[in-house]
Image (cartoon, rainbow, N blue to C red):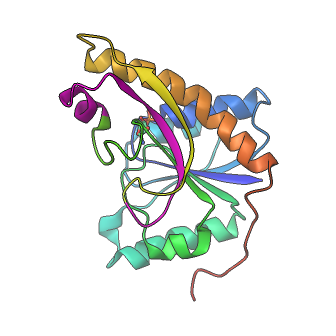
Amino acid sequence: KNIAVFASGSGSNFQAIIDAVQMGELAANLSLLVCDKTGAYAIERANTARIPSFVFRAQDYPSKADYEKEICLLLKNSHVDLIVLAGYMRLIGPTLLREYEGRIVNIHPSLLPAFPGKDAIGQVLAAKANWSGVTIHFVDEGMDTGPIIVQERVRIEENESRESLQKKIQAKEHKLYPSILQMLLTKGEVERDEKTCLN
Ligand code: GRF
């Protein structure tokens, strides 16, 4: 099966997926990286791993539909089966959703539905919660609202710093994401659907 990873930033989850494929723990072909920012570190990770990367800047398109149509055409040409969002800081719109519904997954650093959106780690610390965690879910039209696939908890200690919580959450993410992708692909939940992007 062919995977496309979407990222906007550092891409440490992308790296964990690359490593899992290279170690033979994730039986998938990493077809390409889609990035919405020039200069994102994720692009360097793609280059090092010899994975093609494509930058699509939303501001270069007249509308979100045009932006996503272009991405969709690339994905179809590359026979992508599964879209993996890994720190992609943009809401998926109807154009991509229509073509890939049920085949787009996201990882979020909180126990959804608590603390959706940006800076979930800052939000959970401000709320003085005792627990946070990681959620992997299918993507729908909402912000971090789609059907949950798996969650894992992380204990927040007293006087926990942002850095230490982030470190614990990321360590969990890097283990969990590749293994869940492997599960989704082997369970046959992800079937390719050859539509055209234009209808
Ligand atoms: C991760 O914490 C992920 O849960 C969230 O964005 C962050 C991306 O980090 N969606 P990285 O770019 O994979 O390092």
Q: Position of residue 179 (x, y in %)?
A: 68, 34
User: Taking the image as four quarters, which one is ligand 1 found in?
Assistant: top left
Residue extending farthest left: 126
Let me know if residue 49 appears in the view: no
In this rendered view, identify the residue nearer to me: 144 or 178. Answer: 144
Let me know if residue 27 appears in the view: yes
In this rendered view, identify the residue nearer to me: 141 or 198. Answer: 141
Relative vertical location of residue 28 with respect to residue 161 in this rendering, above or below: below
Relative vertical location of residue 184 with respect to residue 23 in this rendering, above or below: below
Q: How many marks?
A: 0
Q: Position of residue 198 (x, y in %)?
A: 57, 86
Left or right of 183 on screen, residue 104: left
Image quarter of residue 194: bottom right
Q: Residue at x 49, y 40 (%)?
A: 135
Left or right of 55 on screen, residue 52: right
In this rendered view, identify the residue nearer to me: 195 or 183. Answer: 183
Q: Position of residue 33 (x, y in %)?
A: 56, 50
Q: Find the magenta span and give its range.
A: 121-142
Q: Position of residue 26 (x, y in %)?
A: 75, 36
Residue extending farthest top: 158
Queried whether the magenta region covers residue 123, the answer comes back as yes
The C terminus - image quarter: bottom right
Relative vertical location of residue 152 with respect to residue 50 in this rendering, above or below: above
Residue extending farthest bottom: 199
